[in-house]
Amino acid sequence: MKPPLIEYGVPLDPNSMIVPADATELELEAGHPGLGDAAYIERRKQLFQLCRKHRLENLGPPIIEYNEEETRIWQEVSPKLDELHIQHASEIYLKAKRQLGISDKEIPQLRLLSEQVDRVTRMHLVPAEGPIPYRTFYKYIGQRGFPVTQFIRHGSHPEFTPEPDMIHDCLGHVPPLMNQDYAELLTLIGLAASTTMEGDQVLALKRFSWFSVEFGLIEEQGEVKVFGAGILSSTGEIPFSLSKDVIHRPFVTDEVIETDYDPSRMQDKLFVIPSFRFLRQEIEKLVKRFNIPV
């Protein structure tokens, strides 16, 4: 008998990893800074339905006319992140960000970014109405599509978002998609996570992804740099991730997939990879070990 799966410190139903729920209407969690703001909620509902329609009908990212408040938030947060990126982000990330021409003055249209990424690595961007289930998320990635949101976080706490938003996705996830090794390792994670029928394997792949794609560090020329989107999109996480308050461990796959985490707090244990090629080789070995037919 297999031991119970544990995620976020609590027992997990393995079936929930295989057949996840899919929200059909906007749901904001308790404590969300946008609760009580009728205009924000209405805007989110509009974008939820628009992006969900485009996702389910394979229409690609819609062109969004961002309003004054959304633009203000982007212009407030983006320059602060850019300054931190220049100091602490992986050179691979910085090069890709420059190639994409992402500006701190104007919110980019994901449809245009998708076209650029597709030309380089054959990845494309899929509109996401909000957080979508892990297995659904990686089914798209297995098809070389990366789900991205198109809404902006609430203006009362522009430095924080309890859910992936445009700033998180565009300034965190999208630039590394321009790297071929990164694109291939993502695609393999996606194929494996959406193919296996074993909940423990999905959880292992989720942890592998969390400590790399979301909260990964990389060594470049003797220095530890950031490449994980969860770090790159947070003005607080970037300096904290490189501080003495965080344990840095070499990326050893067996340790990574046995390490639980709490997504609601800053991460105090992170793993450092030597290269994207190394990470790609590690996921190839893990998928082979799991005997997942991809």
Image: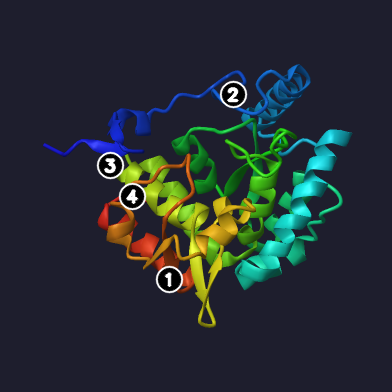
Alpha-carbon span between mark 3 and mark 4: 16 Å
Residue lying at the far bottom in this picture: please name it. 221
Alpha-carbon span between mark 3 and mark 2: 28 Å
Q: Residue at x 66, y 34 (%)?
A: 58
Q: Position of residue 158 (x, y in %)?
A: 71, 41
Disc 3 to disc 4: CB gap under 8 Å: no
Can residue 102 be seen in the rendering of this structure? yes
Q: Amino acid at mark 3?
A: Asp
Label 2 belongs to which residue? 28
Q: Nearer the viewer, residue 81 or 288?
A: 81
Disc 4 to disc 1: CB gap under 8 Å: no
Alpha-carbon span between mark 2 and mark 4: 37 Å
Alpha-carbon span between mark 4 and mark 1: 21 Å
Residue 200's label in the rendered image is: 3
Residue 203's label in the rendered image is: none
Residue 278's label in the rendered image is: 1
Say which label, 1 or 3, has the lower sequence index. Answer: 3
Alpha-carbon span between mark 1 and mark 2: 38 Å
Secondary structure type for disc 4: loop
Neighbourhood count class around disc 2 (C-alpha, 10 Å): few under 14, some 14–19, many 20 upward: some
Vertical comparison of 127 with 216: above or below: above
Q: Amino acid at mark 2?
A: Leu
Of labels 1 and 2, the one closer to you: 2
Viewed as shown, does residue 262 lie left or right of 64?
left
Q: Position of residue 37 (x, y in %)?
A: 73, 20
Q: Quadrant of the N terminus?
A: top left
Disc 2 to disc 4: CB gap under 8 Å: no
